[in-house]
Image (cartoon, rainbow, N blue to C red):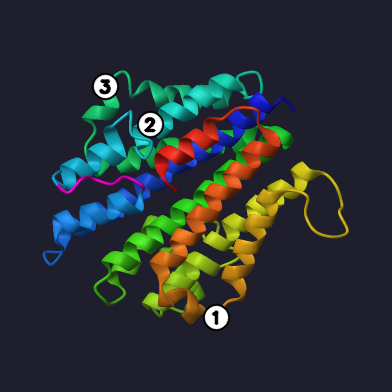
Amino acid sequence: MLSRIAESMFWIGRYVERAEDTARILDVQTQRILEDAATDEETACRSLLAVMGTDLSPSEKAGLSQLLDRLAYDTTSPTSMAFALGAAREAARGARETLSVPLWEALNTTYRAIPAGQFKHMRAPFIFGWVRDRVAQINGTADATMMRDESWQFLMLGRYVERADMTSRLVATTSLTSTGGASQWNSTLRACGAYDAFLRVNKGVETEQAAAEFLLLDRIFPRSVVHALQRAEGALDTLEGTTRRAGFSDEAHRLIGRMRASLEYRPLHDLLADLPAEMERLQVTCAEATEAVTKRYFAGAEALAWQSVRGA
């Protein structure tokens, strides 16, 4: 496969997933800020922006307006939904001959809302639902119309590396802003579409520890960190195309596998002791794995440049 097409498919997967997960994070955090009178708006907004890789200077005001501008509407901010949707469409132009016609139309139609001004005029929480619906259509169209060849594997690799990274950011923001009790973790579970599954697994018992464990370590829930890392490893296995008897030949596989094993085989209380630091370590691993994939498979430098901007 041409490295240009492989890179485009990888970044379509990442950007589309990032748009959806940013919408999920914003949905939870904005509701929490508005509904909890004990929450300091400026502190909460600064914490969320920092976790998402966007720092404000001490002199800049941090409120819901600034938060939504940086993470939703600003087309020049690498952490915003508008930027992610535009970048996904631009990446799709680089792989136009590989994409199915319905998938290209789903990506292009979603993007057209941005230059047309429709996106800018949507307000929370409607915009979060709109982004999630459009991403569901894009992903559903990809699942239904794409062959399971190398281009599909790069799309899945990008999707699941980004999902692991973004789930870790959602967990980190909840850990940083939690004031005790299970209510904030319940909101986080709902943001991931995990609340019903969590209740079935835990027989209706809701605790912070159980919620964190589910989002991090559940092997069969599709938005958990461990499941995302497993799927990323599976994509790399297929792309490698060899049955090695020992070790791995690519650094990305080694990094992702080591991170997954570290999460799965460590005692839960060790992970929860300093959850924000553990999630930051996971984000660094995702950044390093992206760099390794870029060096091995892609000729372009887009991934390295994006990582330096985002500060992951």
Expressed as whole percent of the image width and height from the top left, the position of residue 103 reads 56, 27
Q: Is residue 15 visible?
A: yes
- Callout 3 crowding tier (Cα within 10 Å): few <14, some 14–19, many ≥20: few
Q: Is residue 114 left or right of residue 32?
A: right
Expressed as whole percent of the image width and height from the top left, the position of residue 179 reads 24, 73
Tag 2 residue: 83
* Residue at (32% x, 28% y) in the render: 75
Residue 194 covered by magenta stretch: no
Above or below residue 10? Residue 46 is below
Residue 184, located in which quarter of the rendered image?
bottom left
Expressed as whole percent of the image width and height from the top left, the position of residue 287 reads 53, 48
Residue 267 numbered tag: 1
Tag 3 residue: 117
Quadrant in the picture for the N terminus: top right
Identify the mark nearer the N-term, 2 or 3.
Answer: 2
Above or below residue 6? Residue 191 is below
Question: Type of residue at label 3?
Answer: Gly
Closer to the camera in the image, 202 or 306:
306
Q: Is residue 193 visible?
A: no
Q: Is residue 39 left or right of residue 116?
A: left
